[in-house]
Amino acid sequence: MAETTGGELGQGSGQGDSSAAGKARPGNRRFAQWSRDYTRLPGIPDEFIAGDDAPRPVWTRFLEAFAALSPVEIERRFGAADRHMREAGVSYRAPGESADRHWPLSHLPLLIDEAEWQLLSAGIAQRAQLLELVLKDLYGEGRLVADGAIPAAAIAGSSEYLRPVCGVRPPGGRYLNLYAADVGRGPDGRWWVLGDRTQAPSGAGYALENRLVLSRVFASLYKSMNVERVAPFFEAFRDALRASADRDEPRIGVLTPGAFSETYFEHATLARYLGFLLVEGDDLAVSGDRVYIRTVAGLKRVDVLLRRVDSNSLDPLELDAASRLGVPGLIDVLRKNGVVVANMPGSGVLEARALLGFLPSLARRLLGEDLKMPHIATWWCGQKAARDEVLSRLDEVAIEGAYGRGVPGFDGHGPVLASELPAAERDRLKAAIADRGIDFVGQELVRLSTTPVWDNGGITPRPFVLRMFAAATERGWTVMPGGFCRIAERPDARAVSMGDGARAADVWVVSDKAVAARTLLPGDAVRIRRIAGVLPSRAADNLFWLGRYLERAEATLRLIRALGAQQRDPGKGAPSLLQAAERIQRLLVAWGAASQTSRTQASKVAAEALQAEARFGSALSLLRSAQRTASTLRERLSPDAWQVVTEMPARLAEEVEDDDGVVSAAELTLQELATFAGFAQENMNRAAGWRFLEMGRRVERAINTARFARQFAYDEATGEDLDILLTLVDCQITYRSRYLVGPVLAPIRDLVVLDTYNPRSVAFQVEALNDHIASVPALTENGLIARPQRLAVATQSTLTTAEAGHLDTKTLFSLEQDLLNLADAIGAHYFPHGANASRPEKLTGLA
C-alpha cells in the first residue's frame, strides 16, 4: 500500500491550464455545456479523451448525470462519503509513521469501459500465469538460470529469494494465489505495467471500502452506469483458498503483523468480509506437521494462511532469526504439506525490478507468446551492456533500486533523476552504478495519464496509477473488475505513493448492459450450523482488557461527576461534605487519575482526572487505551461500536472551559459508554468473544464497586459519604424506594455489595462471572475445575453467606483483593504469554 510503484514517472503531466475546469460548476448551463464539449477546453484530464481525440463515451455518460447535480448536492454527497470513512475508521499508516491517517478517498471514480477492461484483464491474467511459471522453475528445477534465461546474480541479489524454500512444492499447488500489478496509461493511450506485486499484494480491502462508499454516495448513478460488481471476485478468491486445503471445511486465517502494520485496517476488513480469522504469529503454534491457532478452547488446526507478513519474517528458525512476527517451524510444516500459505514464501523475489527486462523473452519461452501488456523499458545494471547504456543516458532515465524501495545510498523511497542532482551527487550516483551495478536499474521516463479529481468546487486533472488484482482459481486467473486508483496531489508528480499525500479512487468498469447484483452472502445450499466459532487467545485477551479499560474509565468519570456535584452543592462548607470531597480526591490520586500536588484544589483534580494525558488513570488515558485495544479487534467490532470507541477519546480531548464543562464532558462520556454497553448486549453474538468482553467488564466493575464501598461505606461513614456511594453506583432511586429513610450503613452495604438483584452490586458481577467462566471451554481433561472458576465460586459463596451487618472495612478490603486475584487468574489461565504460551497441561482434542 505505501510502497512507491516503480517507474511511475512523468516529465510533465500535460494538463495545461486548469483554470477553465476549476471555474466550471455543475448544476448550471455552463457546466452542462462543458460536459459535452470538454475536448475543446484546456486543463482536461487525459482520461476524458480517447486516442482519436474524441470524448470517451463512458465519461460522457457520467458527466451528463453529474452535471444535473447542484453544487450543494455535490458537497452534501461528498461530505457523506468523508463522514462514512471517518466513522468506519478507514485508515492506513505511511512508512516510518506511528499514527494512522484517514483514508484519503477521491470523490470521483476512475471509469473504464468494458471493452478496454477486457484487454487489461487479459494482459494481467497472462502476466500472472507467466510469473507463476517463473516461480515454479526458480524454486524447482532451476532451468531458467541454468540455461541463462535469467542471470543467477539477478536472483541471488534479492533478499526475497529464500533458499530454505527451494525444492518445496507449495501445498495447494500454487506459488501465487493473489497477484497485483500497478499499471499506468501512457501518452499514446496504451497501458503499461509499472510494477508487480507478488509478495503479499495489498489494496484489495481498500478497493472494497472505496466501492462501498461511492456506490452509496452515487447510488442511482452507480446503478444506471452498469458498474461491474467486485463481490464475484472475492467469492472466487475465497472459494479457491477453501479448495486449496486438504479437508472439506478448512479453517482459514489472515496472518497479519499486527495493529502497527501500515495496512492493518485492510487485514481486518478482508478477514471480516471473507469470514476468515485474523491471526498474528503469536496466535499460532506448530505441532507435528500441522499449524494450530491458540484459542481459549485449546489448539485448533488452521489449514490456510493468507499472509500479510513478509516472507523473511515468517519463520525465525529458518529465515530472519530476529523476527517476532512469524511462526517457528512454519517452513518445515510447508515441506510436510501441512498448511497452505498464500502467497508462498519467497514469491516476493518477482517484485525485483532487476527481472523486468527479462520477462518479454521469458513469455516467449514459457508461454509461446509475447506479453499482451508491456512494461516500461528497464535496464538492469548488473549486465555490462545495460550498465553502459544507462550510464551513457544517465540524464534521460530514472534510477531505481534493483531489489527494494528506494535507491541504495540515497534518501527517500522513490526514483532518483540524475538530471536534478547537484554535480557532486550525480558523480556519486554514476560511480555507485559503475562500481556495483547489480543494485541499480535504469527505467525509461514516461508520462502518466491524468484522471479527474474534485478540487475547490471544480474538476482538476491529476496523474494516477491503477492497481489491478488477479486471483488464482480452478478456472484460471480471475481479475477483479475494478481495483483502486492512486492519484497524485501534484500535477507534476513523478511517483504516486500513499505516503506522499496521494488520494485513492474507486475504479468503475462500465458495461453496456445491466449488471446483476452479487453478494458474498451464502445461498440456501449451505449446511446450517450453530457454533460458537474460534476465538484466538490474543483476541480474548484484548476483549477482556477492552471491557476493563471501559469500566475503569466509567468509574473515574463517576468520581469526577460526584466531585463536581460536591463543588456545586450550596452546603459545601459543611465539614462532612468537605471530608467526603476529600475522599473522592484521594481516590482519584490513588488511581493515577490526578497528581498529589493538585489536591489543594478540587476543580484541578477533576480537570486532571478527566483530561490529563500524562496521568495513566485519567478518563482520557483509559479511553485511549481502550481505543488502542479495540484497534486490534477491528474484525470483531461492528462499525457502530467502533465509532463509539473512537469518538469518546476524540471528544474528551477537546478543550473544556470551566468546572461545569468538566462535569458536562464526564456526563456525556458516561452516556457514550452506556451506548457501547448497549451495542455489546444487543449486537454481539453470545459466543466466547462476548463472554470475555463481559468478564472484563464484570470483574472490573466488581473491583471498583468494592473499592467504592470500602472508601465511602466505612464503619464511621457519614450520611454524605453514603449518599456519594449511592450516586457512584446508580442506586439512589432503588434505595429510596426500598427504604423510606435517609442513608443507613447496613442497608446500603447490602444493596451495594450483597444484593444480586442490583446490576451494580459486587454480588451481581460475581454471579455473572461464574456463569461466564462456566460457559467458556475447559482446557483440561482431568475433570478438575480451573483456578478462575475455583476463585469465582469461592467468592460467590462468601457473598451469598455474608450478612450486611457483619461487613466492615477489613472484610471489604479482603473482598477487593479476592477480586483482583480472580482477574489475574483469568488472564494467566486463558491468555498465557511467553514460556507458558504452549500450555503445559493436557489439552482437549486438537481439531
Image (tube, rainbow, N blue to C red):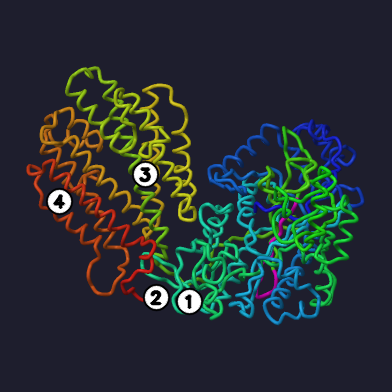
Marks 1/4: CA–CA distance: 46 Å
- Along the polypeptide, which appears first: circle 1 or circle 4? 1
Which residue lies under the disc numbered 1? 290
Q: With respect to residue 531, does 442 lie above or below? A: above
Nearer to the camera, 666 or 76: 666
* Quarter of the image where one finds residue 73: top right
Which residue lies under the disc numbered 2? 846
Marks 4/2: CA–CA distance: 38 Å
- As helix, strand or loop, the secondary structure at mark 3 comes to helix
Q: Is residue 508 visible?
A: no
- Along the polypeptide, which appears first: circle 2 or circle 3? 3
**In the displayed structure, does residue 494 sit left or right of residue 253?**
right
Q: Is residue 640 visible?
A: yes
Q: How many neighbours does mark 3 have within 10 angstroms: few (below 14), some (14-19), or many (20 or more)?
A: many
Q: With respect to residue 810, does 536 lie above or below? A: below
- Along the polypeptide, which appears first: circle 1 or circle 3? 1
